[in-house]
Image: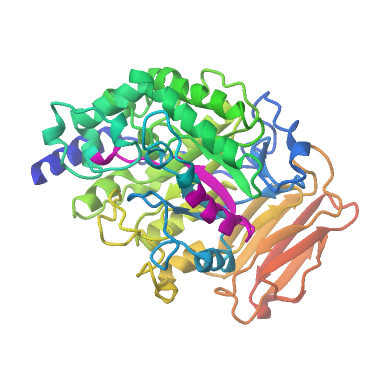
C-alpha cells in the first residue's frame, strides 16, 4: 500500500508541479477582467422576470443575481452525507433545525447539499420518492432561513465497490481488476478498475447516462419552484477514466471534456430543461482541473442562458501528501492562483456564472485564509468543504476530522475558532449594483466595498438595498462605518448592514472597522 501511494504521489505530482510554479498569473480583480459585462451571447437576462414569485438565483452576465437583480455573493458550506442512506438524519449526529440556525447565525448564505444518484435511483430506472422526501426536509430547513441550496449529485471513486460513493451498485459492473482497487481515497482513482467504471459512464454503456438523466429530471421536477434554490450541480469531480494521464497535463484534455463529459452534460441538461426551463445548471470540469489543468468546457457551444461553472481548488501535492501522512510542500500558492485563472477563462467561454464550490478539507488555516483572500480579489463566492465530518470515507482528511468546522459533529461549542474566524468574515451578501472590489483586511480588522449603482443588466439600482454581513465574531464591541455615495438604513451595529445609494450617485464606497476607527 505504501509503495502504491508513494508511486502515485510521485507520478501525479511530477506531472502537475510545473503548473504555474514561479510564474503563475497574478490574481486580478474580476472588475479588471471585465466580468461586469456578459461574457457570452446567451440570453442570461431574459428569464429574470420569471422568478419574482420565488427567491431563486439566476445568471446575469457573469454574476449570480436574486429576484431584485442584486448581485449575490455566496459564502457557504458543503453538507454531503456519503454513507447509506445518503441523507443526513434528523438527529444531532446529522442535520436539524439547530444546524440551519447555526449556519444562518454565522452568516453563511448557501449550502451545497449532497443528493446521491445511489439514493435517487437505488434500482434501475426507478426513482425513490421517499429519498427525495428526506432530502426535502433539509432543503426546507435551509430555505426557511434564507440560505440558498445547490443540489449536488455527489460522487467520489464512483461507488462503494471502489471504497467511494455516488453511483448505485447496479451501475457498477465487476472487473477483473477489482482485487487491486483497495488503495482508498484518492488512490483508487488511478486503478484500472475504477477507470473502467467511469469509461462505461462516458460511453453510456447499458444506457447508464439515460438513467442518470432520468434521476436528474425527477430531482428538477421536484424542486424547480423551490424558494432559495440556486440550481443543480450535475456531477461532483468527474474522473476522466482511462483518459486521466492526458487530462493531468497542464493543457488538459480537449477530447474528453468537449465530447464525452460535455456530451453527458448536454444529455442531462435536456432532461432538466424538459421540466425546469429557468434554474441554473452547474457544470464541473474534469477533476484534474482542481489541481491546475485547463478546462475545455464550452469550446463546443452550450446553448443555454442559465449555466454555472462549479469548480474546486485544492493543491494536489498537499492533497496526496496529506493522504499519505507526509509533510506538505510550499508550492500551493502558485497552483491555487492558477486554478482561479483557469476558472475565469472557462466561465467566460461558457457564458456562465462561477462558484468555487469546494476548497479546504483541512485545518490548514494559512491555506484557507489564502484561498478566501483570492476569492475576495476575484469577487468569487465559495462553499467550504465541509460543514461536518460525518464519517466521510473519501477525503484528504483521512478520518482525522480536520475537514470539519467542528471538533465534534454533535457539539456546536466545539467549533474550531481559528478556522471559523477565517470563514465567518465580512462580505457583501447582496449588492444593489455591480461590485468593483471588496476585501477583508485581517490584520487591520477592516472591510472595504466599492460598487457601481448600475445593475448587471444595465438598469439603475434605484432604492434597492445592499446588504453586508458583519460578524460579531470580529466586531464584538460593534463597528463603525465610513461611506460615500450612500447611506446606512439599518440599526447601529446590525449583523446585516444595509445601505442605499444616494440619489444620483454613480458609485458607493464603504469602509467598516472597529468603533474607534470612525463614526456612522
x and y percentages locating residue 153 in the rendered image: 44, 39
Quadrant of image for the N terminus: top left
Q: Residue at x 27, y 28 (%)?
A: 197
Q: Which residues are magenta?
A: 133-160
Magenta stretch: residue 140 in it? yes
Nearer to me, 66 or 144: 144
Report whether 251 appears left or right of 16: right
| Residue 171 versus residue 186 in the image, above or below | above
x and y percentages locating residue 316 in the rendered image: 31, 43
Magenta stretch: residue 203 in it? no
Residue at the outermost right position: 503
Quadrant in which residue 173 is drawn: top left
Nearer to me, 472 or 317: 472
- Regarding residue 259, the answer to whether it shows in the image is yes
Q: Residue at x 67, y 33 (%)?
A: 278
| Residue 502 versus residue 267 in the image, above or below | below
Report whether 105 appears left or right of 254: right
x and y percentages locating residue 404 in the rendered image: 38, 61
x and y percentages locating residue 481 in the rendered image: 72, 70
Quadrant in which residue 397 is drawn: bottom left
Amino acid at each position: 500500500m505504501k509503495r502504491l501511494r508513494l508511486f502515485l504521489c510521485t507520478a501525479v505530482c511530477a506531472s502537475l508541479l510545473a503548473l504555474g510554479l514561479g510564474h503563475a498569473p497574478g490574481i486580478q480583480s474580476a472588475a479588471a477582467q471585465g466580468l461586469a459585462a456578459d461574457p457570452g451571447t446567451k440570453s442570461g437576462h431574459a428569464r429574470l422576470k420569471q422568478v419574482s414569485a420565488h427567491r431563486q438565483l439566476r445568471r446575469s452576465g457573469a454574476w449570480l443575481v436574486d429576484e431584485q437583480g442584486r448581485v449575490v455573493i455566496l459564502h457557504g458550506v458543503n453538507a454531503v452525507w456519503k454513507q447509506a442512506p445518503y441523507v443526513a438524519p434528523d438527529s444531532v449526529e446529522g442535520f436539524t433545525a439547530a444546524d440551519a440556525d447555526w449556519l444562518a447565525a454565522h452568516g453563511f448564505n448557501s449550502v451545497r447539499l449532497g443528493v446521491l444518484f445511489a439514493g435517487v435511483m437505488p434500482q434501475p430506472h426507478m426513482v425513490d420518492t421517499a429519498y427525495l422526501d428526506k432530502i426535502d426536509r433539509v432543503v426546507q430547513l435551509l430555505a426557511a432561513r434564507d440560505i440558498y441550496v445547490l443540489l449536488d449529485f455527489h460522487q467520489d471513486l464512483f461507488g462503494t465497490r471502489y471504497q467511494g460513493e455516488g453511483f448505485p451498485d447496479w451501475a457498477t459492473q465487476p472487473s477483473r481488476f477489482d482485487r487491486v482497487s483497495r488503495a482508498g481515497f484518492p488512490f483508487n482513482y488511478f486503478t484500472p478498475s475504477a477507470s473502467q467504471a467511469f469509461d462505461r459512464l462516458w460511453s453510456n454503456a447499458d444506457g447508464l447516462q439515460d438513467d442518470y438523466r432520468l434521476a436528474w429530471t425527477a430531482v428538477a421536477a421536484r424542486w424547480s419552484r423551490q424558494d432559495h434554490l440556486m440550481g443543480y450541480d450535475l456531477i461532483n469531480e468527474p474522473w476522466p477514466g482511462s483518459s486521466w494521464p492526458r487530462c493531468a497535463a497542464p493543457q488538459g484534455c480537449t477530447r474528453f471534456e468537449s465530447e464525452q463529459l460535455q456530451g453527458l452534460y448536454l444529455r442531462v441538461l435536456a432532461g432538466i430543461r424538459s421540466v425546469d426551463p429557468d434554474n441554473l445548471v452547474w457544470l464541473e470540469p474534469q477533476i484534474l482541473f482542481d489541481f491546475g489543468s485547463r478546462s475545455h468546457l464550452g469550446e463546443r457551444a452550450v446553448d443555454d442562458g442559465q449555466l454555472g461553472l462549479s469548480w474546486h481548488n485544492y493543491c494536489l501535492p498537499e492533497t496526496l501528501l496529506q493522504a499519505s501522512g507526509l509533510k506538505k510542500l510550499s508550492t500551493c500558492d502558485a497552483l491555487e492562483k492558477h486554478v482561479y485563472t483557469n476558472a475565469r477563462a472557462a466561465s467566460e467561454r461558457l457564458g456562465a456564472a462561477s462558484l468555487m464550490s469546494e476548497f479546504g478539507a483541512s485545518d490548514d488555516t494559512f491555506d484557507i485564509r489564502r484561498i478566501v483572500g483570492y476569492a475576495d480579489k476575484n469577487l468569487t463566492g465559495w462553499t467550504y468543504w465541509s460543514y461536518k465530518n460525518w464519517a466521510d470515507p473519501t477525503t484528504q482528511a483521512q478520518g482525522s476530522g480536520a475537514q470539519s468546522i467542528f471538533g465534534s459533529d454533535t457539539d456546536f461549542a466545539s467549533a474550531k475558532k481559528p478556522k471559523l474566524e477565517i470563514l465567518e468574515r465580512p462580505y457583501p451578501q447582496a449588492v444593489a449594483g455591480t461590485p468593483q472590489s471588496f476585501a477583508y483586511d485581517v490584520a487591520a480588522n477592516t472591510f472595504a466595498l466599492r460598487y457601481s449603482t448600475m445593475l448587471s443588466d444595465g438598469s439603475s439600482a434605484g432604492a434597492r438595498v445592499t446588504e453586508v454581513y458583519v460578524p460579531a465574531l470580529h466586531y464584538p464591541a460593534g463597528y463603525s462605518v465610513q461611506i460615500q455615495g450612500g447611506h446606512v438604513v439599518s440599526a447601529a451595529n446590525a449583523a446585516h448592514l444595509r445601505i442605499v445609494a444616494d440619489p444620483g450617485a454613480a458609485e458607493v464606497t464603504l469602509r467598516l472597522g472597529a468603533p474607534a476607527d470612525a463614526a456612522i
